[in-house]
């Protein structure tokens, strides 16, 4: 069964189109990364899935039903972000106690042990925590709620690297022990990709790719060598980026669709064929047409 299905889904805020005719299906028990540049529509998509927003056009179904104002969806789903609506007059311990009322699969023991491990004092109020500690608290709540649909919107905001590393491990361990559909939005794909199964890359509200992580890492390659050797590559329509490397060499990023005979000839001419990290691949796939940041300085 599909947990989420959208068909030409759009969300428009005034003159801004946040989600643009998006068609997507997400199956059961998948750990998915939702990736995209600032303003790509990640938060809006999560809010549409959660039923917090009404679509402007198109269809969305979650557990087979339209999610807006839907009790089945809200009782089987959690969406955490940096403003989880916890009651400010409750301490962390009281918040944890109240969660069992909302989430039938709430694992109180796990939530308590994680709070102890991350040194979150259960007697304090969440608004006295640092930014990174608040993110940790909300992520603990998101994980311990064990909802069949768990969405974490930029869960690691403000966390230091050591905490992020531990949180990724917690996410993976709990997912493997209790498989469910988890969608995690993040700008730190290089850190997160190890635990993800699939990646959805949004660009200006549209789906750029939805692929298993291994396939994304094979989408583009980098070639490094002499200009003359790379000339036939530059004639193809597969070039995504090129940068000079000294007076007579180049580095070229291309879609990994070059014909085998061309690849063979490049190797013979000592062109290096290198892989591209997945986070960089996403940047190339969502490149704007305005050139690079250097062009801002080359305005004369
Ligand atoms: N309440 C709103 N009113 C008007 N425009 C909005 C609103 N919320 C989002 N937008 C616009 O919709 C687009 C998508 O925003 P969204 O927050 O979904 O992107 P995002 O991918 O989550 O971005 P980021 O990575 O920066 O958090 C942006 O252009 C944003 O300015």
Image: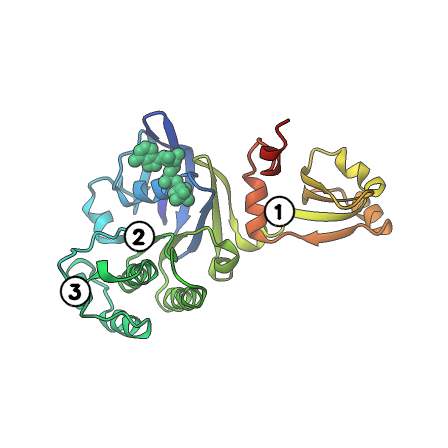
Decide if residue 101 is on the left or right side of residue 2: left
Q: Which residue is mark 2?
A: 82
**Residue 35 sits above or below residue 300 on the image:** below
Q: Who comes first in sequence, dot 1 or dot 2? A: 2
Which comes sooner in the sequence, label 3 or label 1?
3
Question: What residue is drawn where x is 40% and y is 53%?
Answer: 184
Using the numbered discs, state the Cα–Cα distance from disc 3 to disc 1 in whole angstroms: 48 Å
Q: Which mark is residue 91?
A: 3
Q: Nearer the viewer, residue 66 or 292?
A: 292
**In this rendering, does residue 28 appear at all?**
no
Figure quadrant of the C terminus: top right
Q: How many marks?
A: 3
Q: Which callout, 3 or 1, points to the residue nearer the camera?
A: 3
Mark 2 falls on what kind of element?
loop
Q: Which residue position is annotated with label 1?
A: 219
Look at the numbered discs 3 and 2 and tell me whether their residues touch, using CB distance below 8 Å.
no
The quarter of the rendering in which ligand 1 is drawn is top left
Other-residue count near label 2 (Cα within 10 Å), few / some / many at <14 / 14–19 / ≥20: many
* Residue neighbourhood size for the residue with mark 3, other residues' Cα within 10 Å, grouped as few (<14), some (14–19), many (≥20): some
Tell me where residue 284 sits by quadrant.
top right
Compared to residue 154, the image places residue 236 above or below, namely: above
Residue 111 sits in which quadrant? bottom left
Residue positioned 15% across, 65% down in the render: 94
Marks 1 and 2, how far apart in space?
33 Å
Residue at the outermost left position: 89
In front: label 1 or label 2:
2
Upstream in sequence: badge 3 or badge 2: 2
Q: Is residue 155 left or right of residue 227?
A: left
At 57% from the left edge and 55% from the top edge, which residue is drawn? 214
Point out the residue furthest to the front here: 300
């Amino acid at each position: 069964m599909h947990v989420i299905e959208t068909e030409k889904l759009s969300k428009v805020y005034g003159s801004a189109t946040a989600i643009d005719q998006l068609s997507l299906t997400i199956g059961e028990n998948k750990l998915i990364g939702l990736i995209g540049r600032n303003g790509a529509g990640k938060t809006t998509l999560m809010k549409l899935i959660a039923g917090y927003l009404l679509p402007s056009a198109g269809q969305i179904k979650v557990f087979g039903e339209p999610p807006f104002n839907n009790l089945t969806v809200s009782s089987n789903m959690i969406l955490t972000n940096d403003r989880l609506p916890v009651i400010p007059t409750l301490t962390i311990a009281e918040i944890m106690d109240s969660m069992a009322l909302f989430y039938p699969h709430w694992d109180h023991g796990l939530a308590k042990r994680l709070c102890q491990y991350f040194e979150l004092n259960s007697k304090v109020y969440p608004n006295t925590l640092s930014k990174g500690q608040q993110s940790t608290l909300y992520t603990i709540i998101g994980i311990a709620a064990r909802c069949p649909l768990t969405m974490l919107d930029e869960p690691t905001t403000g966390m230091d690297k050591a905490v992020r590393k531990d949180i990724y491990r917690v996410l993976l361990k709990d997912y493997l022990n209790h498989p469910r559909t988890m969608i995690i939005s993040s700008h730190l794909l290089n850190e997160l990709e190890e635990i993800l199964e699939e990646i959805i890359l949004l660009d200006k509200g549209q789906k750029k790719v939805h692929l298993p992580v291994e396939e994304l890492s094979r989408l583009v390659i980098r070639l490094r060598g002499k200009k003359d050797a790379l000339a036939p590559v530059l004639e193809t329509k597969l070039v995504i980026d090129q940068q000079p490397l000294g007076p007579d060499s180049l580095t070229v990023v291309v879609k990994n669709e070059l014909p085998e005979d061309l690849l063979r000839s490049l190797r013979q001419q000592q062109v290096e064929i290198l892989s591209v990290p997945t986070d960089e691949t996403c940047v190339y796939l969502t490149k704007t047409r305005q050139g690079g940041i250097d062009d801002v300085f080359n305005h004369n």
